[in-house]
Image (cartoon, coloured by chain):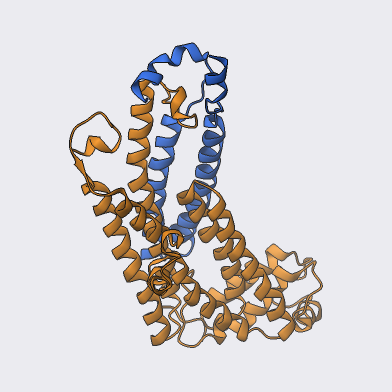
Amino acid sequence: MSWGYGRHIFYLTQEEALNALKYTVIAEPINIFAVGLQKVSIAVALLRLNLGASYRAIVWIAIIPNVIIVVFTLIIIFSRCRPIDLMWDISASGTCWPAEWNVATGYAQAGKFGPLREEKSWEPTAYLLSPYSLEYPSRHCIHRITDCLPSQSAAHQVQPMGSACYFFGRTFVSIQSCQGDLELLTNSSFSATICSIVKITCLPALTVTTDPTCKSHRRLRNGRQSTRLTLASLTRGWSSPFPVVNRRTHDRPHGRLGSRPQTPLRILHAAIHEHHAPHH
Amino acid sequence: MAESMANLPPDVNKGPMELGIAITLTVLALIQVGLRLHTRIFVSRAMGWDDWLAAASMVWASIRSSLIVRTSSHSPSRPLESYRSALTAYP
């Protein structure tokens, strides 16, 4: 059974219209909650990188307003109308707060400045409350990572790639309606994948850092070697900006990596094995 | 009558499109989050708060998508005559 979501309300029966509105109203706070959780998840992932006290402070400054605005938006939604049925049943009797409240909190939660555009003084506040506030810590992280890459050409390759993914994700989210799923996909998938690929190449250069994708609290050892081997696996087939990687893999055909032809997967396995091997 | 019919909003059913987007993105997100959790639980054994939050977010996003699927109109367009009640219910 469907309730006509996707059609103009004019062409729905009264029952269909009521149920379509009801499910849409119920879906709204669920989506806001899901997106809110996802934003905090990204921020906590950034927090685990542990790039210094000021970095952590910036991430916390991004987390706290986001949590506050999500909770505030949910409170506004659920307490807007008494009885709550009035949100989807226009024939019910009762009272509602002005719809502008809902619109304003909705815009703030989504990080859009539509109704606030006239009031420029609101923009810094809206920015703090918005998902874009995570942009600075993310960029800080990317800069720290690209700074430690072994060559400038590598940094030049990586930086646009990360930026392109970020902006592709944001644009994709803004043009679609299924925001929750897309936030999960674009932020968790594309940018996180790029960040992971880039991060793994230079973790040893990041000071006082543990790899959140490895076991907690384990400091990386022999990271330089694993970094280069991982790079070899990632850059094979491209015009590699890292000649040192190619020298290592070509100079030692019968070394620790074995005498079999080296595929990217084997090199990656060797790197992981070497990374986890006990050191004496 | 013909003039009033011309002023009516177009009877376009975007339900199947909504349905397709919701299902496709949910499945992709489920795969993505599932792989992430599998890696963190079984490979690196380093589940953190970010993973738990992503998992919780996925649960709520799935509930939201299922509501869209439940509500979406996937029936073909019906004759206008069956919507006379709408004209009186929503003047």
Q: Is residue A107 above or below residue A132?
A: above
Quadrant in the picture for residue A69? bottom left
Residue A266 percent location from the top left of the image: 69, 65
User: Residue sitting at 34 percent across and 57 percent down?
Assistant: A105
Quadrant in the picture for residue A204? bottom right
For chain A, what colour was chosen? orange
User: Residue sitting at 57 percent across and 69 percent down?
Assistant: A196
Q: Is residue A261 left or right of residue A20?
A: right
Q: Most extreme residue toward the top, as rendered? A: B81
Q: Is residue B28 above or below residue A241?
A: above
- Depth check, front residue: A69 or A202: A69
Residue A64 percent location from the top left of the image: 32, 70
Chain identifier matching the blue colour in the rendered picture = B
Q: Is residue B54 left or right of residue A80?
A: right
Q: Is residue A16 above or below residue A153?
A: above
Can residue A171 be seen at all in this image of the molecule?
yes
- Depth check, front residue: A273 or B27: B27
- Depth check, front residue: A279 or B6: B6
Q: Is residue A44 above or below residue B84?
A: below
